[in-house]
Each structure stands twice: as C-alpha cells, then as structure tokens.
Image (cartoon, grey):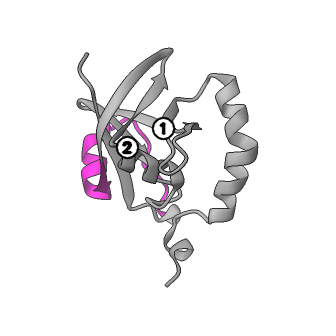
Amino acid sequence: MRKELLMPMPSWWGHVNKRLFNPRAIASGKWPVLTHIGRTSGAAYRTPLDAHPVESGYLFVLVYGSGSDWVRNVLAADGARLRVDGREVELAAPRLVGKEEAFQALSDEVARPPRMLRITEFLRMDLVAG
C-alpha cells in the first residue's frame, strides 16, 4: 500500500496548505508556530499548527500523518521551538503517540479530531525547563 493512502488527509492538500495558507497563518500571528530545522538542508522552517497544552508539554494532531516533513524534521532534531500566546518555548523529546494516549492527555475542552479524518497518530513533546 502506498504511503499517501495511509495519511489522514491527502498529500496534495498538504502542499496547498504549505504554499498558500501557511504563510498567511504565520503572518496573522493568530496561530501557534513551530520552528524546526530541516533534516538535510539545515534550514529553519516555520509551520503553523494547533498546539494543545498537556502536562509538561504540548500535543500536536498529525493531520497529514507522521510522514510529514515537519514531523520528520522534529524527530530527527529531537526538538523544536514553539511560538504560542506571544512567547517562545523550547520543546524536546518528541515522540509519536497513539489516539488513546493523546486523548487521555488532552483536556476535556479540546475537541477531538472528527473520525472521518482517520487520525491515529499524534506528536507529543516536553517543555525544556529553563
């Protein structure tokens, strides 16, 4: 089975988001923005995401699956920086977690992804003390 078929959202939509919507979301300042380092380029990239606070860190819903460039970059670098609520935080120890663990970590006020999106993977990272 091809990897694209395993993603919750089609990869072509991710490319549209990356080129069209992400720059606007970053410029608006309304979204949390994750800064991560490219695995091969070493370049810094910024990706607007839903960042959900959980005990000692943040949880990210992997709408495009764990094969997304930003997820692979974060895992390879073992961390990233997150701009959220007007401040920057350092995140480390990235790990993929399943739906059950993710839903237990999220507060009851956070809406769960719709089942039709078939999201089963989440990324959890810890806040770096400092």
Q: Amino acid at mark 1?
A: His
Question: Which of the two residues, 36 or 122, is positioned nearer the viewer here?
Answer: 36
- Quarter assignment of residue 107: top left
Q: Sequence order check: which comes first, mark 1 or mark 2?
A: 1
Name the spot of residue 112 as percent of width and height, x first: 42, 48
Q: Is residue 11 left or right of residue 82?
A: right
Q: Which mark is residue 95?
A: none
Q: Which residues are magenta?
A: 95-115
Q: Is residue 42 left or right of residue 15?
A: left
Q: Is residue 127 above or below residue 101?
A: above
Task: Please say if the residues under marks 1 and 2 sit with CB atoms less than 8 Å apart.
Answer: yes
Callout 2 crowding tier (Cα within 10 Å): few <14, some 14–19, many ≥20: some
Residue that mark 1 sits on? 36
Q: Is residue 14 magenta?
A: no
Q: Going 73% across and 33% down the picture, which residue do you hit?
A: 24
Which quarter of the rendering shows the C terminus? top left
Name the spot of residue 111 as percent of width and height, x first: 44, 43
Residue that mark 2 sits on? 77
- Extreme bottom residue here? 1
Q: Going 62% across and 66% down the picture, which residue do you hit?
A: 10
Label 2 SS: helix
